[in-house]
Image (tube, helix red, strand yellow):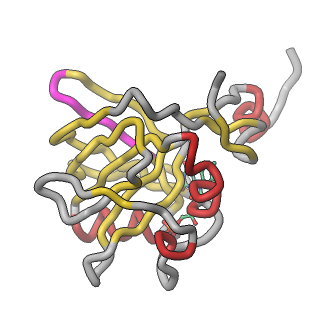
Amino acid sequence: MEKIKLAKASRLTSPNPVTVVCTEKPDGSTNLATVSWWTYLSFNPNMIAFAMAKTSYSGERVRETGKVIVTVPGAEIADAVMGCGSMTGRNTDKVGKFGIELASVEGSKIQIPAHSRVAIQCHMKEYHETGDHYLYICDVEQVYGNEAEEALFAWNGYSQLRPAK
Ligand SMILES: Cc1cc2nc3c(=O)[nH]c(=O)nc-3n(C[C@H](O)[C@H](O)[C@H](O)COP(=O)(O)O)c2cc1C
């Protein structure tokens, strides 16, 4: 073994998971951001966590509203998901720009990409400063799944999105 940087380790662990973090903007529309750094935390009670850069608009919206839906995107929207990870939604409607079809979620103002394999509806329990990111720890309210959608993963670090098979 040789000493390497942590960023290089993330290439060695590819394919890495990919989610789309869905939040509500002040005008009621949905913002979408691509997030690889997420994990299950607990099945009893159901909890998950994800890390987002301190500067991210999505993080700001989660801290403001306390609500978030974390989705695993389907293979059909790979290009759009890469787009959602390349610009902030602070002044841009990413849903319109990348032509992403949305679906409603019962009891939530936040919408999700119609092509999602999994959607985990949460409220934020707490968040912690972790270096240049905040770690958002979330209680899960509801979980949805669709086996017909093929999950996307990030390859070569985070530079390409495609299924694992
Ligand atoms: C494949 C991929 C994975 C990403 N994973 C993360 C992540 O885990 N955490 C993070 O803060 N940003 C991640 N990003 C970058 C954000 O999606 C990007 O900063 C985005 O502009 C944030 O949008 P927002 O400001 O609308 O929240 C990733 C980008 C890509 C393309």
Note whether 26 is above or below 113 in the view shown.
Answer: below
When the figure is inspected, residue 11 is found, relative to residue 55, above or below; the finding is above
Quadrant, the C terminus: top right
Q: Find the residue positioned furthest to the front.
A: 148
Q: How far across and down, in percent of the image, does residue 17 sit?
A: 55, 34
Left or right of 55? Residue 26 is left
Q: Nearer the viewer, residue 3 or 24?
A: 24
Left/right placement of residue 90 relative to residue 163 reads: left
Tell which of 72 and 59 is nearer to you. Answer: 72
Q: Residue furthest right?
A: 2
Image quadrant where one finds the N terminus: top right
The image shows residue 65 at horizontal and vertical percentages of 22, 67
**Residue 29 horizontal/vertical position (percent):** 32, 75
Whether residue 98 is situated above or below residue 42 in the rendered picture: below
Residue at image point 55% right, 73% down? 88
User: Residue sitting at 48 percent across and 44 percent down?
Assistant: 73
Residue sitting farthest toward the top:
1
Q: Position of residue 101 (x, y in %)?
A: 43, 61
Can residue 6 be found in the magenta stretch? no
Task: State whether the magenta stretch is mostly helix, strand or loop.
Answer: strand
Q: Which residues are magenta?
A: 44-50
Query: Residue at 52% of width from left, 68% of height from top?
Result: 99
